[in-house]
Image (tube, rainbow, N blue to C red):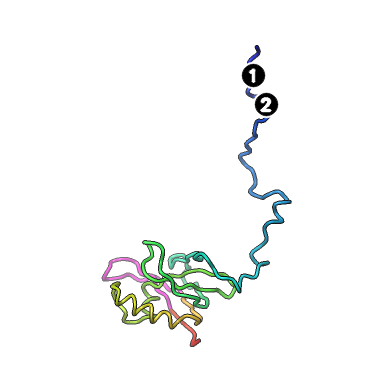
Amino acid sequence: MAAKDKSQKQPGDVEIVKDASATPPNKALALFTTAGALDVSKLKRRNMPRMVLPDTVPIEGAVSGEIIAILNSPTTTVKGKLLHLKHASGEEFCFPVTGAVRQALAPGVKGDDEKSEKELLAILNKEVGKMFIAIRREDGQSKTYKKRMFVFDVFTSDK
């Protein structure tokens, strides 16, 4: 009995292509559509939009959008509340209500206790439906915490 030559393809062998494209076959492409072709304006979002962190906004760059809702942060790295924003392009994203943004939207509300959180939420809920713009400025240095602070000029519409 002759030994099998493993270098030759045998019936039933699967060929593994390391540089395979992620593009599905043409028949499968019909199952997918571009996001722009779908009207989701009358549908309810079931997951959280992506988060834009303050350090990803370039100096002199602006974060803008209509405030859709106030959400609790799902991560431990970003504490507190998030603004759920809808940009003019239709893109939805979350932006943290921390530091300069928190002080601009809810001046004087300090602390992380339950009473402060309720007060903060009540103030932030009054901003829902308004246009929000935050322009990033040069970072500052916190004398209290001895670390870098993100500085934003914050604006909202009257409604």
Q: Quadrant of residue 118?
A: bottom left
Compared with residue 68, is residue 159 higher up or lower down, i.e. above or below? Answer: below
Q: Position of residue 3 (x, y in %)?
A: 63, 15
Q: Local crowd at mark 1 within 10 Å, few (<14), some, or many (≥20)?
A: few
Q: Position of residue 134 (x, y in %)?
A: 46, 76
Is residue 33 a member of the stretch shown in magenta?
Answer: no
Structural distance between the alpha carbons of marks 1 and 2 = 9 Å
Give the magenta part as a residue range: 136-153
Q: Quadrant of residue 116?
A: bottom left
Residue farthest to the right? 27
Nearest to N terminus: mark 1 or mark 2: 1
Residue farthest to the bottom? 158
Q: For the residues labelled 1 and 2, say whether their Cβ atoms are less than 8 Å apart.
A: yes
Give, as a three-letter code, the residue at label 1.
Lys
Q: Position of residue 158 (x, y in %)?
A: 48, 88
- The residue tagged 2 is 10
- The residue tagged 1 is 4
Q: Which residue appears at 64% of the width and 34% of the height?
A: 14
Q: Looking at the rendered structure, which numbered label has been put on residue 114?
A: none
Q: Using the image as rendered, state which of residue 135 and residue 101 is in the foreground.
A: 101
Q: Position of residue 73 (x, y in %)?
A: 41, 67
Say whether residue 66 is left or right of residue 141: right
